[in-house]
Structures are given as structure tokens and as C-alpha cells.
Image (cartoon, grey):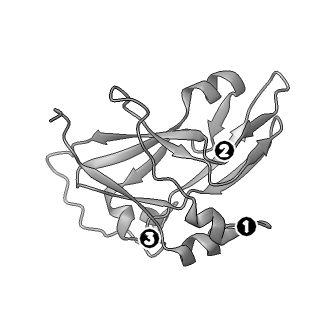
Amino acid sequence: MDNFKRVARFEKVSKENFINSLEGDFNKEEIYDNITLPKRATKGSAGYDFFAPFDITLNPGETVKIPTGIRVYMEENYVLKLYPRSGLGFKYRLQLNNTVGIIDSDYYYSDNEGHIFAKITNDSNEGKTLTINKGTGFMQGIFVEYGITFDDDTTSIRNGGFGSTNK
């Protein structure tokens, strides 16, 4: 048995949710059926790799929004932090447009099923075109425990994604 505390579970969003969020001329049902849940590459990996649900090509300066088809249940007091895969950041300056994605534990219960999206940009200043083949890891997520202040009395409940806690 390992010494890791198990705090989360990845799941696919519903087929309807995914199909409604996917823009473009794709065989959407086939893409949904082939979504791979995030996983660690090795037992020493901190990050869970998220895999591209379709082929992506980005010229320098181009951006794409990717519906991953993934949601995550996690225990309270944990957050999933999303980053570009290290090699893609190093070789292509691949950037997540919000720098670090933050997936809160209560996002799972949102009307959008807690569907995780990634908006990425090829920020190459060397003129490199980035190609990510379907099924290739492009982003990684790390679960982190967090604390709150002694005087915190927040009781608000989330319902939505980006910016939903300010509504």
C-alpha cells in the first residue's frame, strides 16, 4: 500500500454537456467516447496529465479553448491547480491563459457539471508551431491542501465557472 492520501476522483462530464461545449466540425460523439481520464505518468509524479481530446495545432500567438470533458470530485480543503506540461512550456512557451488554473472543490456541483476547460496559447518567440496530437498530455493538475483564516465565516455557494464567485 502507498503512503499517499487519496482525496479526489476524476470523471467524465455527461455526453450532452461535452457535445454542447465542443465547437467546430468534429465527430463529437467519437471524441467523447475516447476521452481519457487524467493520470500520473509515474509513481513519483505529482501532476495528473490531462490529454488532448482532439488534434491541436497552434502557430505562434494563436489561442484555443479546449473542453476537456473532465470533472473532478475532491475533498473539501483541497484545490486542483492546473499548469502546462513542463516540456511544452519549455519548448514552445505554452501558456495557460489564466497562468494557473484553479479548480475549487465545490466546482464539481456547478450547473455545468464542473466541466474543466483549458485556454492555451502558443507564446513561442522563436516562430515554433505547436502540434498536440489527440491523446497527448498538454496540461497537468496537482492537488494541494489549503487552509483558511481563523475569522473566515464564508457561507456562499458556487454555481458556475469563471467569475462565478463574484456574482
In 3D space, how far apart are the residues under numbered discs 1 and 3 (Cα atoms)? 18 Å
The 10 Å Cα crowd at callout 2, few under 14, some 14 to 19, many 20 or more, is many
Q: Position of residue 110 (x, y in %)?
A: 41, 71
Identify residue for label 2.
Answer: 120
Q: Secondary structure at mark 3?
A: loop
In 3D space, how far apart are the residues under numbered discs 1 and 2 (Cα atoms)? 15 Å
- The amino acid marked with disc number 2 is Ile
Question: What residue do we see at 38% from left, 46% from top?
Answer: 80
Q: Position of residue 62 (x, y in %)?
A: 80, 43
In this orientation, which residue lies closer to the viewer: 68 or 43? Answer: 43
Q: Are marks 1 and 3 in contact (CB under 8 Å)?
A: no
Identify residue for label 3.
Answer: 113
Q: Are marks 3 and 2 in contact (CB under 8 Å)?
A: no
The earlier-in-sequence mark between 3 and 2 is: 3
Question: What residue do we see at 54% from left, 74% from top?
Answer: 15
Residue 32 sits in which quadrant?
A: bottom right
Question: What residue do we see at 57% from left, 40% from top?
Answer: 137
Q: Position of residue 96 (x, y in %)?
A: 60, 41
> Is residue 82 left or right of 19 when viewed as pictured?
left
The 10 Å Cα crowd at callout 3, few under 14, some 14 to 19, many 20 or more, is many
> Is residue 160 left or right of 137 when viewed as pictured?
left
Residue 156 sits in which quadrant?
A: bottom left
Name the mark on residue 6. none
- The amino acid marked with disc number 3 is Glu
The earlier-in-sequence mark between 1 and 2 is: 1
In this orientation, which residue lies closer to the viewer: 163 or 83? Answer: 83
Which numbered mark, 1 or 2, is in the foreground of this view?
A: 1
> Is residue 107 left or right of 17 when viewed as pictured?
left
Question: What residue do we see at 55% from left, 58% from top?
Answer: 35
Identify residue for label 1.
Answer: 23
- The amino acid marked with disc number 1 is Glu
